Amino acid sequence: MKERIGIIGGGIVGSTAAYYLSRAGYRVILFDEGIGQATKAAAGIINPWFSLRRNKPWYFLVSQGAEFYRQFMADLEQDGFNDGNIFQVDGALMIRRSDKRYTKDLSQADEKRPDSPSIGEVKTVQASDLLPLLNEDIKATYVEGGGRVDGEALITSLHQAIKHFGGQIIHEKAQFNIDKSIITIESNSTKETVDRLLLSAGAWLPELLAPHGYETDIRPQKGQLYYLQDNAWENKHWPVVMPPGTADIIPFNNGTIIIGATHEDDQGYDLSIDEAKLQQLTEEVRQIAPQLANYSIVKTKVGTRAHTSNFDILAGKVPEMDHVWAVSGLGSSGLTSGPYLGYQWSELIQHGHSTIDPQSFPIENHIIRI
């Protein structure tokens, strides 16, 4: 009989891992309280290839994550859990501050395309030609392979698939214990023994590890976004827009445009709506798409991202614990790298190896026994 796998945290990493392991016949139990979860509150842009970050391990994850989305969606479709609205590729428009950056984008595309064929065509365009809501004087780099993902729709489909393949999902807060190498997970309603455990609770990882004598270098970051709606925007296949600042414009083909999200490092785990922060997003949008600034907000979402102090991703086996792994610190790139990390952990469990090099993500730098 295959192993019993426990996962605490049902966001993008934990749910992807649970999907692939339950699909492979493992006995999976996923604990997902869901409060403040970043994935459900997010709409993500999958267009990582042009970042100026020089962190090579981070770039490996996000670039591989962008490529993996094609396989990921094909697997969900094969299993009957992808309606085509979770992940859509209609291109991305990157608005730059200087002509030099537009030139750099073109050279970066040529350098990275051999390892990242999903980039597709890249060119400098008049932005309003592809999204008429933008000011006519705005230039942009157009990336054919840029996509968008609906975080809540993805989690919903993954949870349906997990249950379909026999996995359990417990929507409760959980803690774990280890006694003589036996791992147990306990919530209000159940106590389960598992053979392997993944801690993928995002910004709540410190809370899971503190009772075991660990100090965890994870801090919360609040993110808010909002929805606009107009039936006239349906089926336009407009690209996403990445301007300077935090007010990304993410059109979906159902007539929704999502604006956001904020990056608030001083609000802890607060999940309340801050109208002033939303107004700041609107003012940023007004500079490039004045029409959108006049629409009424129809819906808002708030989530809590996880960051390490140096913005490295935390991924690996928990020091001095057998059969317990942790993944956290993905920040605002979580929807890009998260599925790939979850899939690779499932590969590690199934086959004993993955493409994630532990030396590139030294978990002992972020989880320390005190």
Image (cartoon, rainbow, N blue to C red):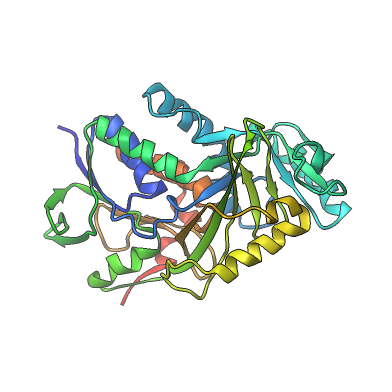
Q: Quadrant of residue 287?
A: bottom right
Residue 101 position in % (x across, y down): 82, 52
| Relative to 350, 297 lies left or right | right
Residue 9 position in % (x across, y down): 32, 53
Residue 8 in sight: yes
**Which residue corresponds to the image point at 19% horizontal and 47% vertical from the top-left?**
195
Q: Quadrant of residue 152?
A: top left
**Which residue corresponds to the image point at 53% horizontal and 35% vertical from the top-left?**
87
Nearer to the camera, 95 or 175: 95
| Image quarter in which the C terminus is found | bottom left
| Relative to 61, 49 lies left or right | right
Residue 79 position in % (x across, y down): 36, 24
In the picture shown, does residue 253 fall above or below 303?
above
Q: Quadrant of residue 216?
A: bottom left
| Relative to 340, 193 lies left or right | left
Nearer to the camera, 163 or 341: 163
Nearer to the camera, 340 or 302: 302
Residue 245 in sight: no
In the picture shown, does residue 199 fall above or below 81?
below
**Which residue corresponds to the image point at 43% horizontal and 29% vertical from the top-left?**
82
In the picture shown, does residue 93 fall above or below 85?
below
Residue 232 position in % (x across, y down): 65, 36
| Image quarter in which the N terminus is found | top left
The residue most toward the top is 78
